[in-house]
Amino acid sequence: MMKIEQNTVFRYCALILGSAVVAFGLAGFLVPHRIVAGGTSGLATIIYHLTLFPIGILVFVIDIPLFLWAFKVFGFKFLAKTFMVAMFLALFLQIFNLLIPNAFSPDPLLSAIYGGIITGAGMGIIFRFGATSGGTDLIAAIFRRYFHWKLGTGLFIADGFIILLSGLVFAMDLILYGILTVFICTRVVDIIQSGTASAKTVFVITKYPEAVKNAIYENVARGVTVFHGSGGFHEEMREILFSVVGTYEIAKLKDAVYSVDESAFVVVTAATEVLGEGFNAETTQQK
C-alpha cells in the first residue's frame, strides 16, 4: 500500500511540475511576443493583450465550459487529473506572468523556438503521467468520441482556428511563429513520451488476463490479442496479452493494467510501422 501511495504522490508531483514548466514557457517566451500556439492559453493570450485582464484567470475561465461539456461526455474519472493540471497551469501562468515582465529574448523567432521546447517538455511530462492540460485537448477528445476523428485532426482544427485568429487580431507573421512553436512542441512531446517511435507494442503477463483485457478495452479502447504459452521454469500455462497503442496512450494502458494486477509483467517495445484499423500507415498515429 505504501508503494502505491508513493507512486501516486510522485505522479501528482510530476503533473504539478509539468504544469509549472508549461506556464514558464508561456510566460517567459510566448505570451510577451503575442505568439499563440493554440489551446486555451493561446486564446487567453489574445484576450490578455486586448484587455490586460489577468491571463491566469482567463485560462481557467475559458476552460470551465469545456470541462463541464467533457464531464457530461466522459465522466469525472477521465477529468480528475486533467482538471488538477488545468488549475495549476492557470495558477503558475498568473504567477510567472507577474514575475517575468518581459520575454527572456527580444527576438520573437528565438522565443518561438525555445517557447516550443519548454512548453513541449512540460506537456510531455503531463501526457506521460496520464493527464492533459485541458482546453483544446478536451475538444479533440470530444470530436473523437462523436465523429471518430483522429486526436491530431481535432487538435489541428481547434488550435489552427486560434492561431489564425491571432494573425487576424495582431499581425499575420505571428501565424508563422505560432505554427513553428506548435511543430517544435509536438516533436518534444513525442520524444518525451516514447522516444522517436510513433507507436508501441505491449505484452502483458498477468494472473487476471480477462479482467486486464476488459480494463484495456474500457480505458484505452484498443484491441487485445491473447497468446497461450507456458512459463519456462514452472511450465505453467499462461495467457499473454498483446496490444498496439499510440504514443499518448501508453500511460493510460499501464494505469489500466496495474489497476487490476499490481504484479503484472509488462513489456513495452517500439513499433516502427503499424498498418491496420486505428492507425495511419504513414505516421502510425491513433485515431
Image (tube, grey):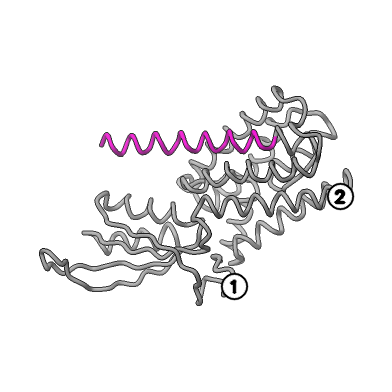
Q: Is residue 62 left or right of residue 198?
A: right
Labels 2 & 1 near each other (Cβ < 8 A): no
In the rendered image, the residue lying farthest to the top is 99
Local packing at callout 1 (Cα closer than 10 Å; few below 14, some 14-19, many 20+) is few
Q: Identity of the amino acid at label 1?
A: Glu
25 falls in the magenta region: yes
Quarter location, residue 187: bottom right
How far apart marks 2 and 1 lie (CA) works out to: 30 Å
In the rendered image, the residue lying farthest to the bottom is 276
Q: Where's the N terminus, which quadrant?
A: top left
Viewer-closest of 101 and 73:
101
Q: Which mark is residue 282?
A: 1
Q: Is residue 223 above or below residue 186?
A: below
Q: Where is residue 55 shown, x and y percent of the image?
A: 72, 31
Q: Identity of the amino acid at label 2?
A: Asp
Local packing at callout 2 (Cα closer than 10 Å; few below 14, some 14-19, many 20+) is few
87 falls in the magenta region: no
Q: Where is residue 86 shown, x and y percent of the image?
A: 58, 38
Q: Where is residue 100 shown, x and y percent of the image?
A: 72, 25
Q: Is residue 88 left or right of residue 39?
A: left
Q: Where are the magenta residues, as a range? A: 1-26
Q: Which mark is residue 26?
A: none
Q: Is residue 139 above or below residue 126?
A: below
Q: Residue at x 71, y 49 (%)?
A: 181
Quarter location, residue 32: top right
Q: Secondary structure at mark 1?
A: loop
| Residue at mark 2 | 173
Q: Main secondary structure of the magenta part?
A: helix
Q: Residue at x 34, y 72 (%)?
A: 225
Q: Where is residue 269 shown, x and y percent of the image?
A: 40, 62
